Amino acid sequence: MKNTKRNFILFLLVFSILNLSCFAMALTTDLKNSYSAKETVIGKISGSITEPIQSDSLVIKRTNVVVPVESGIKKLGDDYYFWFVSPNSPDQYSLIIKNIATLTSGKIQKVDLMQNFSVVNYSDYYVTPGVILTQEDFQIKVFLEEDYNKDIDLLIPSSEIRTLKPGENTISISISNFKRTSLNTIKIGKYNIPILAVLNESVPAYEDRKGLSLSPPSIEKKVSVFDNLNYTLAVKNYKNEILKDIIFEYNLNRFEINPKENITLKPNESAVYTLIIKNITSEGIYENINLKSSNATTFMVVKIMFDQEKPKIIENESTNNKTNETNNTQINYRCAEIEGGRICDAGQRCSGKLLTASDTSCCIGECVTATTSKSWIGYLIASLVIVILIFVYLKFYKTRADKNPLKRKISEAEKKLP
């Protein structure tokens, strides 16, 4: 009985660990193993995130003690980026991002994402903020921790050298330097800072935290016409009452949302839908999707811009020296998406570079008619010569064996006498 109970407890423990591992694998960051003290850490969260992450969700701990740091979390496009200034004491630390709503096995669950890192040495300077979402001109503060001036490279977007003085330095940046609604990166010395400059006239992302919530509140993306445009939508009832007859209203020629049935949500209950974008054109999409119930409404903005530019294959010098047979590069594009890509028919060969595209072999060059090889003629002649030689050899051997036929016949007759 004791062994059975012990095995059951062990089973529950293993099951819990496996479940926690699944949660941990669902969300990850690109956090490195170590940083310098007073260094600006900039990272990205990967995984399915169904509700906005609050700006105060990021915590740094040493063992179980919270360490105050400057930090922030911003959603740039479809992805969440975080930043913080690492603690000024070398030690072991943990990054914790609390209460992330993620999709696990078809259900929305709140989990804490935790990753460990260490702080070693000391950084010469750090910047704040490390992630920027703005509609107007902005400033970046650079703090030099040394007692003498230091030159750093800037790329915003033109290149220049800036001399830092000990202490606080301010770099003023105009929003006109950046392409609107597209993710950009600026270089401040050793830091690459992601920035999203949004249009002032853009429709703001809307989410009713006191009523009916639709997440993500907007989809703004530049994609290829060949991309699979399916998105996961999460609906949540924040009201203290039951919401009935919840239904989407949208352009049926542009979108499809499944499931299509009306639903009912209790307080704090969630539901998951799949949005499919169809009838893709080069003009793009800029439309609203409305979500309504008996006593609450909300909406989301879908802005899809299509990039029809085909990717170019850039070859280096070593690549050009290889033959077509050995230089078969594999890429993650279909042949139709590659500039100059062709699919050669049967009986043709590629006169240029042969690639392995995601759908088939792809020729970057011309497809030419394959010349018929005449090597079979040589094989045929060689075979005939071998047959003739075998025939001559057998004939010679038989003739040699019958050199004295009279003697052979007399010998055979003698053997038959009694």
Image (cartoon, rainbow, N blue to C red):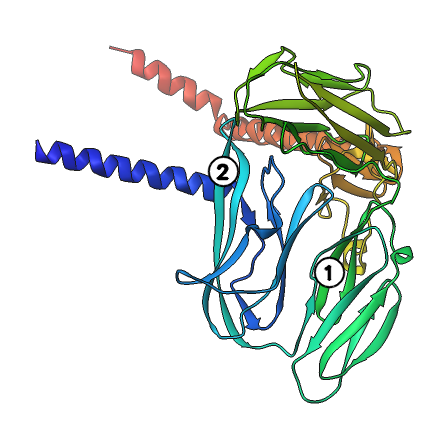
Quadrant hosting residue 153 = bottom right
Foreground residue, 148 or 365? 148
Q: Residue at x 59, y 37 (%)?
A: 48
Say what amino acid the circle numbered 1 marks: Ile
Q: Residue at x 61, y 70 (%)?
A: 39
Q: Is residue 161 above or below residue 376?
A: below
How far across and how far down the image is residue 245, in percent? 63, 11
Check the image and name the residue furthest to the bottom: 148
Asked if the residues shown at circle 1 and circle 2 are in contact, with their CB atoms under 8 angstroms apart, the answer is no
Task: Tell me the element at label 2.
Answer: strand
Say what amino acid the circle numbered 2 marks: Lys
Q: Is residue 373 visible?
A: no
| Residue where numbered disc 1 is placed | 193
| Residue where numbered disc 2 is placed | 110
How far across and how far down the image is residue 205, in percent? 75, 37
Badge 2: few (under 14), some or many (20 or more) residues near its Cα, within 10 Å?
some
Of callouts 1 and 2, which one flags the residue occurring earlier in the amino acid sequence?
A: 2
Q: Is residue 320 above or below residue 89?
A: above
Measure how far apart labels 1 and 2 are at the Cα level. Answer: 29 Å
367 sits to left or right of 242: right
Q: Is residue 210 visible?
A: yes
Task: Tell me the element at label 1.
Answer: strand
346 sits to left or right of 98: right
Foreground residue, 377 or 291? 291
Quadrant hosting residue 250 = top right
How far across and how far down the image is residue 224, in percent? 81, 35
Badge 1: few (under 14), some or many (20 or more) residues near its Cα, within 10 Å?
many
Q: Is residue 40 above or below residue 214?
A: below
51 sits to left or right of 222: left
* Number of numbered callouts drawn: 2
